Image: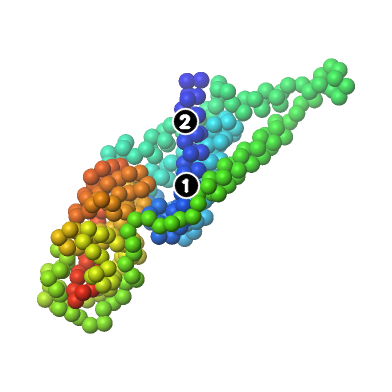
């Protein structure tokens, strides 16, 4: 019984996690800061579980995102109700283990990432189920053993209702509840209206080399200072598309991932990866800082350094050049 609060916490948290994903208008919207596809790329980047995501999830981000959300709701309902508790807890443990090996892998020290704590919180229920606690598992076992009264209401007939029939009915109820909650969460999400910084145009390679102006980014390579735009650089858009104190996003010419470019109040450009180093959501520029909408990390908009966790690694600085009234991204 001492573990009952933990079981209820795990169950309710998993239901909430699934609802939170399905009710997020940006979760399935390509280009949104919380788009599942962007998160998956971030999870897979340099992590031991990345191969799993590359093989199974990254090619089908929508399917993976919806599948995980529905699985979380189903596990949450089963564990809260104490139905097939051991199996449901095992699925929960595997999910959190995969998240530990991907999402939380770069969190240091390791105990600051919650997934490893969830793995060990699931363990008692994988081993012992809801033994000794109020649960549907215990109720089904009790009913299956109870003798049924005969049709005439006379003495017990002695026949047993099979546990399998009761279990099937309970699972149908849990399945209906899962789909009902998932459907309500999805219907409540509304449509995505965009967030964060505007996007600069698609990258194009410059036709001719030009002489750089005095507004060259402080991150531009000195090796190319005299030769104009570096070879391989791709045009992002006109300089006047980005005024002082504003930011815009673009696709990194090296890997297609979102980057953010910021023009500070002195007119200087800084660019960095827009993929949060915590769990791969896309950061947005707000009031001079880069803010992650998923778990609230804040990064310095000039250096990429973490100013508030849970992220522990800085955003990678990117190379941009301003020349001849145009802004270019230089592949790393
Ligand atoms: S993804 Fe968790 S704080 Fe950014």
Is residue 281 depicted above or below 201 in this figure? above
Relative to the observer, which residue lies in front, 72 or 327? 327
Residue at horizontal 15 percent and vertical 75 percent from the top: 212
Between label 2 and label 1, give the one nearer the viewer.
Answer: 1
Residue 177 as seen in the image, left or right of residue 123: right
Residue at horizontal 30 percent and vertical 49 percent from the top: 291
Residue that label 1 marks: 21
**Residue 45 visible (yes or no):** no
On the image, the x and y values in percent for residue 183 come to 58, 47
Q: Is mark 1 within 8 Å of ligand 1?
A: no
Q: Is mark 2 within 8 Å of ligand 1?
A: no
Going from N to C along the chain, the mark reached first, 2 or 1, is 2
**Residue at the top extreme, as displayed:** 155
On the image, the x and y values in percent for residue 19 come to 50, 43
Residue contact at pointers 2 and 1, CB within 8 angstroms: no
**Residue 156 visible (yes or no):** yes
Residue that label 2 marks: 9
Quadrant of the frame with the C terminus = bottom left
Residue 35 as seen in the image, left or right of residue 290: right
SS at badge 1: helix
On the image, the x and y values in percent for residue 2 come to 47, 20
């Amino acid at each position: 019984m001492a573990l009952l609060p933990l079981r209820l916490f795990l169950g309710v948290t998993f239901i909430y996690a699934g609802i939170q994903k399905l009710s997020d208008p940006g979760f399935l919207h390509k280009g949104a800061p919380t788009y599942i596809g962007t998160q998956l790329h971030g999870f897979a980047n340099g992590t031991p579980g990345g191969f799993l995501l590359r093989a199974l999830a990254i090619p089908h981000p929508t399917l993976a995102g919806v599948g995980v959300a529905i699985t979380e709701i189903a596990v949450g309902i089963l564990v809260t109700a104490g139905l097939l508790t051991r199996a449901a807890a095992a699925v929960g443990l595997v999910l959190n283990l995969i998240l530990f090996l991907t999402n939380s892998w770069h969190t240091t020290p390791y105990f600051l990432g919650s997934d490893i704590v969830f793995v060990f919180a699931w363990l008692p229920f994988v081993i012992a189920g809801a033994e000794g606690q109020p649960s549907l598992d215990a109720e089904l076992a009790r009913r299956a053993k109870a003798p049924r009264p005969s049709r005439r209401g006379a003495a017990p007939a002695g026949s047993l209702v099979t546990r399998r029939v009761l279990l099937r009915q309970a699972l149908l109820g849990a399945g209906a509840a899962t789909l009902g909650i998932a459907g309500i969460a999805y219907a409540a999400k509304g449509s995505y209206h965009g967030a964060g910084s505007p996007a600069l145009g698609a990258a194009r390679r410059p036709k001719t080399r030009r002489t750089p102006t005095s507004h060259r980014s402080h991150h531009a390579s000195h090796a190319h200072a005299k030769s104009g735009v570096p070879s391989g650089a791709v045009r992002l858009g006109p300089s006047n598309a980005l005024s002082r104190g504003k930011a815009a996003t673009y696709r990194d010419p090296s890997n297609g991932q979102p980057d953010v470019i910021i023009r500070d109040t002195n007119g200087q450009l800084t660019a960095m990866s827009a993929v949060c180093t915590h769990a791969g959501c896309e950061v947005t520029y707000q009031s001079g800082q880069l803010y992650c909408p998923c778990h609230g990390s804040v990064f310095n908009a000039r250096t990429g350094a973490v100013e508030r966790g849970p992220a522990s690694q800085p955003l990678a600085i990117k190379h941009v050049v301003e020349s001849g009234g145009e802004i270019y991204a230089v592949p790393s």
